[in-house]
Image (tube, helix red, strand yellow):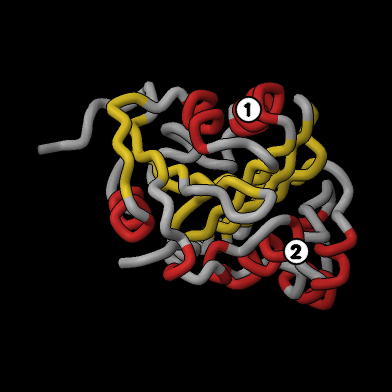
Amino acid sequence: MTGFGYKTSWLAVRNRTPVEVADALGLYDRELLDWATGTGRAYQHGVYVAAPVPGWTLAHSRRHLPPGFDAAESSFPDWLTALSRQLGEVQFFANERVPDYHAWAWARDGELMRAYCFIGELGEVPLFVGAATADEIELGIGIRGLTPGCENWSDEEWTAWYDTTPCESDVLAIAGRWSIAPTAIDDATVTTPGIYGIPPSFSSVPQ
């Protein structure tokens, strides 16, 4: 499998090198891997920090971003803001089709500017921080949370809310507007190896 974007999570970090991103993530057992090998392996275990595209360095992992939890958990905002204190501007994206789990977030210099997570399997928005951005508003996605009293909404109000909930392609649309959608990267143009490694809270790759 070459490239990534579906059934995974990733970071987009502005104007930082792969080494800086790998250091901030605390990756160990590092290897230099080409794009196809690194992205494929990160779908199984570990994190792959790709060679930068103009303005952005992308890091992805299906299982380890965030390390050991997901954007629905209370520890996520602290994790992302801590990264942004080290790296400046950090964006997070995730999608998983089966549980209908979709998330995006943006932190800068230690401040969480915007964060949204939807879990369709549970019918929940467990994370809604900050005002919806102009891009979300224009696309009409992720712009409404679940407010107190929503259990009394009418059928029309529930329909209006569901119309704003995202699918996996919407996550990529937000990524493309905020930074870069990884599916838009031409695999053939990524010729410089990236850094593959294991996050500190996990053991080495199973043999």
Q: Identify the mark at residue 131; answer none if there is no mark.
A: none
Q: Looking at the picture, does residue 111 appear above or below residue 140?
A: above
| Quadrant where the image shows the C terminus | top left
Report helix, strand or loop for mark 1: helix
Q: Residue at x 49, y 48 (%)?
A: 51
Q: Quadrant of residue 4?
A: bottom left
Tell me if residue 192 comes above or below residue 196 in the rendering: below
Relative to the observer, which residue lies in front, 99 or 104? 104
Q: 8 or 72: nearer the eye?
A: 8
What residue sits right under mark 2 in the picture? 177
Residue 76 is drawn in which quadrant? Answer: top right
Q: Residue visible at 82% across and 50% down?
A: 147
Residue type for callout 2:
Arg
Determine whether 50 is above or below 161 in the image: above
Query: For numbered disc 2, what is the local secondary structure?
Result: helix
Of 53 and 183, nearer the camera is 53
Q: Earlier in the sequence, mark 1 or mark 2?
A: 1
The answer to whether 190 appears left or right of 108 in the picture is left
Find residue 66 and report its horizontal and vertical position in percent: 50, 36
The residue tagged 1 is 83
The quadrant the N terminus occupies is: bottom left
Q: At 78% from the left edge and 34% from the top edge, which residue is drawn? A: 108
Classify mark 1: residues with Cα within 10 Å, few (<14), some (14-19) or many (20+): many
Which residue is nearer to you in this view: 136 or 178? Answer: 178
Give the x, y percent position of residue 31. 29, 36
Q: CA distance from mark 1 to mark 2?
A: 21 Å
Question: In the figure, 64 relative to 141: above or below?
Answer: above
Q: Is residue 185 left or right of residue 116?
A: left
Q: Are marks 1 and 2 in contact (CB under 8 Å)?
A: no
